[in-house]
Each structure stands twice: as C-alpha cells, then as structure tokens.
C-alpha cells in the first residue's frame, strides 16, 4: 500500500502526506503522544499512478487487556461515522472474526467501498472481543479521525470535471494553487534531504567538539541498555522471589483455613456431645417422669391394698359375728325340737281343721285360677316390682298392690386422692372403663396434665407427661377405641397440632400435621370408628367454617368439602350418627346460631345437607 493508518487499541493512526508522517497514540493505553518522521517520495509517486478505485488501506493497532498487552485470536469490528461522538454510520460494518494479536499488535486491511470518502469528515470506530467470547463487542473510545491518505486515494480517482471524478488523472492546470505538484514534492524532498545531511554534519561537528563520535555515543547507549537489561532481570528475580513469598503466604493461609476447619469440626463434635448430653438429659427426665407415674400408680395400688386390708378386717369381724350367730342357732335348734314335739300333739287337732278347710278350698280354687291368669307375667311369689309411674294401672290390673315409694340413691362423692388439679376448659372422655381428664386452664394458664379415674376401684392415676402435647385449653378430645386423641386449642396461640395417648403403653404420640387444618379452638370433633374429624371453631382470623378428617392408620389428612357447608361458628355441637356427621347450633358472627347440617361420609367425603332452621 502507498500509505497506512495504524492504531493502538482503537486508534493509533499514522498517515504519511507529502513525505512527512505523524503518529498519534490513543491515551487509553496509558502512552504519551510521540512523533516521528519518514520519507515516502516513491510512495507518492505510486499513489499518483494508481487507478481511480476505492482501494483498501492498512490499519495497524495495539490492544491492551487490563494492564497487559493482549495475545491470541480476537474478533474485531470497524465502523465509519460522520461525527466524532454521535453522527450517522457511513458504509457497512467490517468484521474480522479471527485476527492474530501478538504482544498487543495487529494489522488489518480496511475497504469500506466506493463513495464513503466524499470529502466530509470521517471517524473510525473500533470494537473488539476475544475470538471465543459470546459476549457483545467492547467499543474502544474515542473514535479516530480519518485524515490525508484516504482522501489522497479519492483525489487521484477522477477525470474531467473535478466535481464529477470517475477515472483517469487530472492535469496540473486543473488543480488548485493549494495542492502541491509532483515537481514541488520532488523539490521539497531534495530540500529535506539537504537539510538532513546538513543536520548530520552539524551533529558530527558537535560530537567531535565534545570528544565524542556516533560510535562512542552508540556504545554508551548500548551500555545503558545493558544496565537497563540487568536492572530488568533483577526486577524479574525480585518479582519471582516476591511471588514465592506470596505463594508461601497463600500456603500458610490455606493451612490456617484447614486449622479453622478442624476447629470447626471440633466445634461440631462439641455440639454433638452437647446435643447427646441434652438427649440423655431428656431421657433422664422422661425416665424420672415415668418413675413419678409408676410411683403414683404404686401409691394407688398401695391405697387399694390398704382398702382391701380394711375390707378383709371387716370380713373377719363379720365372720366372728357369724360364729356368734351359729351358737345362737344351736340354742334355737334345741328350742325348735321342743316346739316340734308340741306341734305333733297339735297336728291331730289340725287334721280336723283340714277337713273343715276342704270346703273352703273349693271356693278358693276359682279365685286362684283368676289370680294365676293375672300373674302370667312370671313374677315370682313374694316378689317386688318397681315402676316409675306413681299409679301404674297395668300392674294394678295384674293384681299387684302399691305398698310404698322408693327414693333414688342420689349423688355420692368419689375419691379425691391423686385427682387432677382444679381446672376448666378441659376435655373428658370415657374409655369404656375409665374417665380420662386432660388439659384445660389451671391457675389462669393452659395445662398439659391430666388424670384417669377408675370407678370400679374409686381411684385416680396420673396421665403421663412424657412427650405430652404442649399445654392448651379449649381443645377437642375423643376416645378412638384404644387411645385418647386430642387436637387444637389455645396455648398462647391457636394450635394446629395434636397427639394420641395409649392406656396400654402410657405413651404420647404426635398426630400428623401435613395437610392438617389451621390452628383453632371451639371446634367440633368426632370419632367415626376409623377416622378423626375436625370442623369449625375460631382462630386469630375469626370464626371458621372448614375442617379436615384424619385417617389414623395412614396419618393422612383430607379436607372436608366447603360446598353447602354450615355458616362460620364456634362451640357448636357435633355427633357421629353411624355414617354421617351432624352439626347444630353454636356462636356465629351475629350471635347464637339456630341452624345445622349433615355431612354423609362413607369411604370418602361426600356432600353436605343443610338442616332446616
């Protein structure tokens, strides 16, 4: 090429015009402005001889990555604009997908096509990215002006009228006075050559006066270069040593991190020991609670043994009394024997009387037949019949006579030994043989205690507190065949949890909470024979009209249908009627509620039928 433009990053430009070349380096790479001079007399001669075509020009540049010179393959994009900052793009993009960059330097040939250099200002924009980088181009700013050489290409590509250049050349007469002719350029070149020779002679004269020569200056420069090289090598050695120290520091840091990890592991093991200690403490607490339960039960047994001993003493007293009565009976037997002897005498008289009664017997036979018909109900002779009716006409028609009135036995006080503490808002269920009391409000706060009452022995025993649910009141409870089920209630917040208690093992087991209804109190709770059903109540959001049913065997909650469900309420009554839940009454948003509904349930949950008001 007769001329070139070189750029650093996005623009070191070099243009040679009239044999003088000026270089500008982009300050983005941290370099100061430099200048240099070159002689391109033959280049201008070739330029004038080129055909009038839109020829490419060479662009040489330098890329810096961070603070280091770039190396490798890069993808470069060049654009031409008519403004330095904004403006319009002229021509199309030039993209070079794989440009080799060595120590930051690269070279490309740019050809934007004909018509782009029309005489107006042109600015070159460069964008770059690594060859394998999918990210967008990085645009390097500022744009670089295109000067001199491309317009020289334009100037020679015309003939005829200077305003309509196509092909051919222009004669000197058609060029403006401000455009140098070839002869002027040769004259200028000769003058510059003479000035260079004269400058060289002056330089030699000054060097000789100083006792120097170009060779001695060159040797001193070479010596300084050697010293600079030695200093550079020393810096590289010191850098390597510094890198070694840095690596040792990194190794020490890594060892410190390993020690920290070991310390962390020891901390974890300590936490594990603490956790196991806490677990053992919990087990000891459970064992203590179990011992307390067993002690309470043992005390109950001891009380029952004492009661049995007292009853045995009473039996002994009664046996002693029977012995006394036997002695009395022997005396009575002797007396009866004497009376029998007296009766034998009287029998003869009775025989006569029997004859007299024979006639009377016939009269009584008819009455006896009538009475037998009336007593056909199977009432034994001499038996007593009670009736809740004060004047029972049916019994009177059978010949029975009202002889008196029986009062009911009334209340009696059971044992209070080991009974639960005073409370309210608790639950009570019947297991078939025992009354189970649990939870409620005790001394102004929720409780997690309870007791079981055996009416056969008139005795109380405590319900275990090992793994028991959190304290609560206003909860629901049912007897599920072989275990007590409790759910919900209020214990500082509305609770959405529950547990089961086995009388066989005296253990509490939490109920499933996945899919369970939200926490509440005042809810309806029933046992269907296989499932635990919860509906209604209230929580912090207000009254509720929803519920769920828990399959005890699988631990699965199923939401009850909302279609046609009763209105929101709490403290309603609910009963299980064999295959359906019946709900009625309660407190609603406007006060007492006088409505209800029926929810049939077979293998699955079905629809709701509203009860009439």
Image (spheres, rainbow, N blue to C red):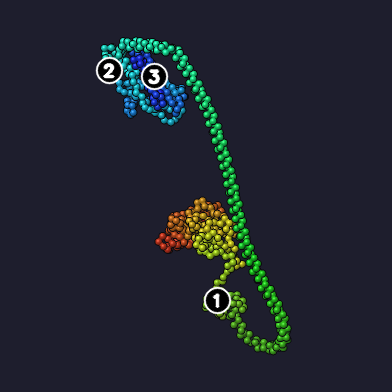
* Mark closer to the chain start, 1 or 3: 3
**Looking at the image, is 14 positioned above or below residue 300?**
above
Residue for badge 1: 407
Contact, CB < 8 Å: mark 1 with mark 3?
A: no
Between 195 and 105, the one nearer to me in the picture: 195
Residue for badge 2: 164
Query: x, y (%) of residue 193?
Result: 36, 11
Query: x, y (%) of residue 564?
Result: 43, 56
Between 190 and 526, the one nearer to me in the picture: 190
Please, what secondary structure does the residue beneath circle 3 have? strand
Residue for badge 3: 58
Query: x, y (%) of residue 116?
Result: 33, 22
* Mark closer to the chain start, 2 or 1: 2
> Pointer 3: residues within 10 angstroms few (<14), some, or many (20+)?
some
Residue drawn at the location 49% of the way across and 22% of the way down? 231
* Mark closer to the chain start, 3 or 2: 3
Residue drawn at the location 57% of the way across and 46% of the way down? 271
Residue drawn at the location 43% of the way across and 55% of the way down? 541
Please, what secondary structure does the residue beneath circle 1 have? loop
As measured in the structure, the alpha-carbon distance from the residue carrying label 2 to the one carrying label 1 is 140 Å
Query: x, y (%) of residue 203?
Result: 39, 12
Between 257 and 391, the one nearer to me in the picture: 257
> Pointer 1: residues within 10 angstroms few (<14), some, or many (20+)?
few
For residue 13, what is the image quadrant? Answer: top left
As measured in the structure, the alpha-carbon distance from the residue carrying label 3 to the one carrying label 2 is 27 Å
Q: In which quadrant of the rendered image does the C terminus lie?
A: bottom left
As measured in the structure, the alpha-carbon distance from the residue carrying label 1 to the one carrying label 3 is 129 Å
């Amino acid at each position: 090429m007769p001329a070139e433009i070189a750029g650093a990053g996005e623009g070191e430009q070099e243009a040679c015009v009239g044999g003088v070349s000026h270089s500008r380096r982009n300050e983005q790479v941290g370099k100061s402005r430099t200048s240099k001079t070159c002689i391109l007399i033959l280049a201008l001669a070739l330029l004038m001889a080129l055909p009038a075509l839109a020829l490419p020009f060479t662009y040489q540049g330098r890329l810096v990555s961070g603070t280091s010179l770039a190396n490798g393959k890069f993808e470069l994009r060049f654009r031409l604009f008519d403004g330095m900052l904004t403006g319009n793009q002229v021509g199309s993009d030039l993209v070079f997908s794989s440009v080799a960059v060595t120590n930051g330097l690269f070279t490309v040939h740019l050809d934007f096509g004909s018509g782009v250099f029309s005489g107006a200002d042109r600015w070159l924009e460069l964008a770059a990215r690594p060859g394998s980088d999918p990210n967008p181009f990085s645009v390097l700013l500022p744009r670089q002006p295109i000067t001199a050489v491309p317009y020289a290409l334009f100037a020679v590509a015309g003939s005829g009228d200077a305003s309509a250049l196509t092909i051919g050349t222009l004669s000197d007469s058609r060029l403006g006075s401000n455009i140098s002719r070839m002869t002027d350029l040769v004259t200028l070149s000769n003058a510059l050559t003479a000035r260079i020779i004269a400058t060289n002679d002056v330089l030699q004269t000054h060097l000789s006066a100083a006792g120097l020569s170009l060779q001695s200056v060159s040797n001193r420069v070479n010596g300084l270069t050697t010293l600079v090289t030695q200093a550079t090598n020393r810096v590289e050695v010191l850098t390597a040593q510094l890198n070694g120290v840095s690596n040792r520091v990194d190794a020490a840091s890594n060892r410190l991190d390993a020690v920290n990890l070991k310390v962390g592991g020891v901390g974890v093991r300590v936490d594990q020991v603490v956790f196991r200690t806490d677990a053992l403490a919990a087990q000891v607490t459970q064992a203590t609670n179990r011992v307390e339960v067993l002690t309470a039960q043992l005390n109950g047994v001891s009380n029952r043994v004492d009661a049995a001993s007292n009853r045995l003493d009473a039996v002994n007293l009664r046996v002693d009394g029977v012995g006394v009565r036997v002695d009395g009976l022997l005396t009575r037997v002797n007396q009866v024997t004497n009376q029998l002897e007296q009766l034998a005498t009287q029998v003869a008289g009775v025989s006569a009387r029997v004859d007299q009664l024979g006639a009377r017997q016939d009269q009584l036979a008819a009455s006896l037949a009538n009475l037998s018909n009336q007593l056909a109900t199977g009432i034994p002779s001499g038996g007593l019949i009670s009736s809740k009716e004060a004047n029972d006409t049916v019994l009177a028609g059978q010949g029975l006579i009202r002889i008196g009135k029986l009062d009911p036995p009334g209340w009696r006080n059971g044992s209070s030994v080991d009974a639960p503490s005073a409370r309210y808002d608790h639950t009570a269920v019947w297991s078939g043989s025992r009354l189970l009391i649990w939870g409620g409000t005790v001394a102004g706060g929720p409780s997690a205690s309870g007791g079981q009452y055996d009416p056969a022995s008139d005795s109380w025993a405590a319900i275990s507190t090992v793994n028991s649910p959190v304290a609560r009141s206003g909860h629901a409870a049912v007897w599920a065949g072989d275990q007590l089920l409790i759910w919900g209630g209020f214990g500082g917040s509305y609770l959405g949890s529950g547990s089961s208690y086995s009388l066989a093992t005296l253990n509490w087991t939490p109920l499933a909470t996945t899919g369970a209804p939200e926490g509440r109190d005042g809810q309806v709770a029933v046992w269907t024979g296989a499932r635990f059903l919860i509906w209604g109540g209230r929580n912090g959001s207000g009254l509720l009209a929803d519920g769920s049913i828990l399959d005890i065997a699988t631990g699965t909650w199923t939401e009850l249908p909302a279609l046609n469900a009763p209105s929101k309420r709490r403290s309603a009554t609910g009963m299980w009627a064999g295959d359906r839940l019946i709900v009625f009454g309660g407190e609603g948003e406007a006060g007492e509620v006088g409505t209800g509904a029926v929810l049939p349930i077979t293998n699955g949950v079905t629809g709701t039928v509203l009860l009439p008001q």
